[in-house]
Amino acid sequence: MTLEVSDLRVYYRTLRGDVRALDGPTFTVADGEIMGLAGESGSGKSTLSKSLIRLDGRMRYIGGSVTLDGDEMPIWDDRAMDEFRYKRVSIIPQYAMSAMNPTRKIGKMIAELLESRGVRFRDVRDELHRRLELVELERDVLDRYPLELSGGMKQRTVMVISTLLNPSLLIADEVTSALDVSTQRAVAETLVEFRDREFVKSMIVVTHDISLVYQIADTIMVMYGGRLAEKASAKTIIEMPKHPYTKMLLDSLPEVGVKYEDKRLSGIPGSPPGLLNPPQGCRFRDRCPLADKQCLEQPPFVEVESDHHVACWKAE
Ligand SMILES: Nc1ncnc2c1ncn2[C@@H]1O[C@H](COP(=O)(O)OP(=O)(O)O)[C@@H](O)[C@H]1O
Ligand code: SF4
Ligand SMILES: [Mg+2]
């Protein structure tokens, strides 16, 4: 098992109290698995992603554990995480393309990054060149500034950089959101190719667009309000979802082959709960057509069928 996450809780400290953005997910990612992570904006996807790499100043580790290839990751200890970060677990953050330092040539930036990880540039130079070629980039991108590259080129560059040391786990957070549809597809295919070539062992591909991950993911995990709603094979999630929220997410998608102009996205009525004072019990309660008194109690995330986990009292 590449990744094992158990009852992980990470909150944001604010003046008004703790925002319970990640409230106890327990799940695994198997060797070779590409897991799509879906859910509306605000469901905790980025908080989960960041927790596995680096807690930013306002994030507070509350409890739970994370194990990578059998080794516990000390996510509460920023220094100790240097052993893992970039080398064993790597992220392509949301907005990575615009976050690239505009005043540094790309090659120089890579050299500095490697140096900060105790790796000599010349030891990986040949492999870097090979991988740039693989994603159809000329070597001379290394002598260029990020501004000189198109969105798609930048995204491919970031993909190569973030996987250069063959991490076990790559987290890709909304990496295709800012791209046009054909570039999106190319980026998604590259992610699969990187897994197939074993540049990375497993992947978490975060998206608010479940139809995109469906094309590349082996499994899909759906989050809602800082908790897990459902996880199963991509096919099962699309064809036989059990959680009412997953069903509504899917219903809100345009039908395959139907253009956006033809069918407006229906959207899901209501909005996700605020996580400063989240509602008791099932966090989907006030939007759920099936809610009843039992839902005042939090439903456990349980395996209802083989490799199909759901947190809903009515999922049987
Ligand atoms: N820096 C922050 N301070 C306080 N709350 C935050 C912060 N960042 C995110 N949140 C809250 O945490 C929850 C999860 O956010 P996030 O992980 O960004 O969701 P997603 O990536 O699924 O859109 C949301 O309720 C959001 O408002
Ligand atoms: S536990 Fe209740 S409120 Fe939550 S999704 Fe299931 S039926 Fe709806
Ligand atoms: Mg996000």
Image: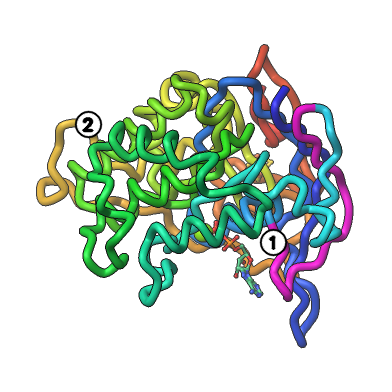
- The amino acid at mark 1 is Ala
Which residues, given as a range, are shown in magenta?
54-69
Q: Position of residue 249 (x, y in %)?
A: 43, 43
- The amino acid at mark 2 is Val
233 vs 250, left or right, is right
Q: Residues within 10 Å of mark 2 (few under 14, many from 20)?
A: few
Residue 193 is at least partly visible in this image? yes
293 vs 33, left or right, is right
Q: Residues within 10 Å of mark 1 (few under 14, many from 20)?
A: many
115 vs 135, left or right, is right
Ligand 2 is found in the corner quadrant, namely top right
54 vs 73, left or right, is left
Residue 221 is at least partly visible in this image? no
Q: Specify the label residue 21 is tagged with.
A: 1
Q: Residue furthest top?
A: 306
Residue under the point 54% across and 40% down: 123
Q: Which residue is mark 2?
A: 256
| Principal secondary structure, stretch drawn in magenta | strand
Q: Position of residue 33 (x, y in %)?
A: 56, 23
Q: Tell whether position 55 is magenta.
A: yes
